[in-house]
Each structure stands twice: as structure tokens, then as C-alpha cells.
Amino acid sequence: MILAVFQVAIATIFFDYVPQSDTETVTDALSSYPNREDIDPRNFETIQKIYNLTVFPANAKIITEGAPAVPSGLFNENATGRVTPVGEFFGFQDSFEYFFGLAPLPFGVPPNGAITNATLVEFASGCPEVAASTVYLNVSTINPDNSTGPFIAVLKQVAFWRFDAEGAVLKYDAWIPNLDPFTNLLHGFDSNSVAGMTNIIGGICQLQETTCVGNNAVYNGVNDCVQTLTAKPFGRSDEAWGDNVVCRQIHVLLTKIRPEVHCAHVGPTGGGKCIDVAYNDVYFNDEFLFDAPLGTPFTCNDSGL
Ligand SMILES: *[C@@H]1O[C@H](CO)[C@@H](O)[C@H](O)[C@H]1NC(C)=O
Ligand SMILES: *[C@@H]1O[C@H](CO)[C@@H](O)[C@H](O)[C@H]1NC(C)=O
Ligand SMILES: *[C@@H]1O[C@H](CO)[C@@H](O)[C@H](O)[C@H]1NC(C)=O
Ligand SMILES: *[C@@H]1O[C@H](CO)[C@@H](O)[C@H](O)[C@H]1NC(C)=O
Ligand SMILES: *[C@@H]1O[C@H](CO)[C@@H](O)[C@H](O)[C@H]1NC(C)=O
Ligand SMILES: *[C@@H]1O[C@H](CO)[C@@H](O)[C@H](O)[C@H]1NC(C)=O
């Protein structure tokens, strides 16, 4: 704790990048944790800042402007991790696209939901390298004037984090439980009903028609897309990684940011991303993913990393 206070003081004096008001806000936020002496305030602030950027309209700005809109210092250029049940992400670009590019935008279909609040309900960080958190992301209707309307649902994410020496996220292993019921509330219909599936396939095909154009085109128009996707398994939001519709429903959102990469994932072959994977391989390949022995990436040690 003393070390952490000292770090903030140093940063304020020499780099002047921690405005006093932010420091106070973080201290205020930390005061609600009974064992706050076990929390590294630098790591708390980094994680809260990351989740704050999922809140509308901060996410909209990143989806429109891409990497330059992501504040520096949050993710290491090599940031790599897994978000169950969505996939694995390698490097800064992949990582920020997942964290911010998939945060819902309210435009289009009712109930027009977006994240309106991000609260770290649980947080622990007993050493500068590692933290664990649970965030509640409250999703509400966004009114036409962008003000917050009625509550829709909470999205929960549980995560372990590893930080580099500067405090940017280097590795993460996160889990979003219960995406099936969450998605149904966000859409306002049952995704697995016939009408719901038709609706979702139509939405994917309409969107890719506007984002996957020219060299990035993967279908011969909306009808070809609808026919191809109707012939595939629908899949479930709680296991979105596979050669199915639900996987493409996620990846089509990212075609707004990098069509040259993500259109292929939405296409007929899945482009190496929306492909059938072996559960026992992809959810347990920690040593490959984190390039470190099992049990070390998210456990405090004296490596001084
Ligand atoms: C997160 O956003 C809230 C609401 O705007 C703000 O009060 C808080 O200071 C932000 N936290 C950080 C660490 O930026
Ligand atoms: C990212 O990884 C590359 C290749 O291993 C390395 O050269 C580079 O220094 C790393 N960047 C950071 C910020 O650690
Ligand atoms: C979330 O709501 C809490 C309680 O109203 C508030 O203190 C906090 O600043 C809000 N955070 C964000 C990111 O909006
Ligand atoms: C988030 O939603 C839950 C469920 O309605 C509510 O109890 C909680 O107060 C909300 N939190 C914030 C900060 O808005
Ligand atoms: C609502 O937010 C979006 C995204 O930032 C912006 O494009 C739009 O102009 C805003 N609408 C209003 C009425 O402020
Ligand atoms: C400490 O953690 C790093 C990163 O996971 C790992 O490479 C290193 O082997 C660990 N050191 C010890 C002594 O366990």
C-alpha cells in the first residue's frame, strides 16, 4: 500500500499523468472494499478504466476510430488472453477489439440496449503483477437523446489479470457466465426460437453486406448469406466458439473495425475463427496461450515482471 501511494506520488510529480481528481476518485471507489489494503490502486484503476470504455458512448468512439481511440497504458502491445466462451485474443489489436468492439451499441432494434454502468463488485490484487476481478456491466435502454432508459440486464465478467512492469495488461483469463439468458434479454426475444434464429441470421447478413464489400466480400449478397447460414448449426451464446451462426453473430460486429480480418470469420468457411474446435484443447491450452507454466501467469511471484 505504501509502495503504491509512493508510485502515485512519483507519477504525479515526474510524469504528471495522474490528475489529483482521478486519484481521489479511485481512493473513493476503493473505500467500499473492506480489505482495501490488499488492493493495488494502480491495478484497480487500470481495470476500472478498461471497463469504463465499454460504457456507451465510449465504446462507440472506439468502434468508429479504432486503435487510436484506446488510451495508452491499458494494454501491452502483446496483450494476450482468453475470454470464455468467445475465444482467444493475441496482441493489442485483437484484445481491444474484443473488450470494446463487442460492447453493445444501442442503434437499430429495440430494446436498444448498451452498457450504462461498469462496477467492479469484487477486486483483489495482492501484488503489482496480478489481480482478479468481477465486474457487473449494467445494460439499459438508450433513449433517442442518448440518455439512460429502463434497465435490461446485467452482464457479469470474472477475470484474472497479469500486468507488465508499467501496469498495462499483459495477460488475461476471463469468463462471461450465462450469455444465453443475457442475450435473450438484450435482444428482447428468444434467440433459439425459429423466429429468433431467422431474425439473427437476417441481422448478420444485412450487416456484413454493408461492411464486407469489395475485396472483403464473403457472400454473393444477402440471400446467399442467409442460405449458407441457415444450413449451419445455430450454436449457443454460452458456447459461441464453433462453425455456427452465433459465432458469426459476434464476429460480424468486428467487421466494423477491421473488415479485412473479420469478414472471413463471418463467411462460409469461418476463416479459421468460426470453426469447430475441441473443447479439451482450446479452453485448456494455457501454457501455449500464456507462454508460461500452468499456475504461474496469475499467481503472485517474485519474478519482478
Ligand atoms: C469510471 O467512470 C465513472 C463514471 O463516469 C467515473 O466516476 C470514474 O472516475 C471512472 N473511473 C476511472 C478509473 O476512470
Ligand atoms: C512484444 O513481443 C515482441 C516479440 O516477442 C518483443 O520484441 C516486444 O518487446 C514486446 N513488447 C513489449 C511492450 O513487451
Ligand atoms: C456506476 O454507478 C455507481 C453508483 O451509482 C457510480 O458511483 C459509478 O460512477 C458508476 N460507474 C460508471 C462507469 O458509470
Ligand atoms: C445494476 O442493475 C442492478 C439490477 O437492476 C441494480 O440493482 C443495480 O443498482 C444497478 N447498478 C448500477 C450501478 O446502476
Ligand atoms: C448518441 O451517441 C452517438 C455515439 O456517440 C452519436 O453518434 C450520436 O450523435 C448521439 N446522439 C445524440 C442525440 O446525442
Ligand atoms: C513468475 O511468473 C512468470 C510469468 O508467468 C513466469 O514466467 C515465471 O516463471 C514465474 N516465476 C516463478 C519463480 O515462478
Image (spheres, helix red, strand yellow):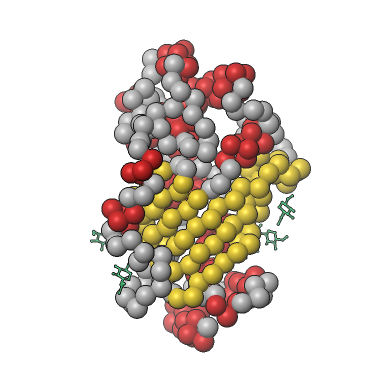
Drawn side of residue 174 relative to residue 149, left or right: left
Count of residue discs: 0
Tell me if I can see residue 44 in this picture: yes
Looking at the picture, does residue 296 appear above or below residue 2? Answer: above
- Residue 27 percent coordinates (x, y): 62, 76
Q: In this view, does 291 lie above or below 125?
A: above
Q: Residue at x 35, y 38 (%)?
A: 278
The spot of residue 153 in percent (x, y) is 68, 44
Residue lying at 54% horizontally and 70% vertically, measured from the top left: 124
Q: Which residue lies furthest to the right in this view?
A: 150
Task: Using the image, determine if residue 169 lies above or below residue 146.
Answer: below
Where's the C terminus, which quadrant?
A: bottom left
292 lies left or right of 38: left
Q: Quadrant of residue 170?
A: bottom left
For residue 23, what is the image quadrant?
bottom right
Q: In which quarter of the image is residue 33?
A: bottom right
Q: Which residue is drawn at 31% across and 34% down?
A: 272
Q: In this view, does 197 lie above or below 108?
A: above
Which residue is pictured at 54% across the width and 20% down the height?
Answer: 202
Q: In this view, does 148 lie to the left or right of 127?
A: right
Q: Where is residue 271 in the image (x, y as percent from the top left)?
A: 32, 31
In the image shown, does 160 or 224 lie closer to the viewer? Answer: 160
Q: Is residue 217 visible?
A: no
Which of 120 and 104 lies nearest the eye of the viewer? 120
Residue situated furthest front in the rendering = 280
Instruction: Where is residue 43? Give x, y as percent.
Output: 49, 69
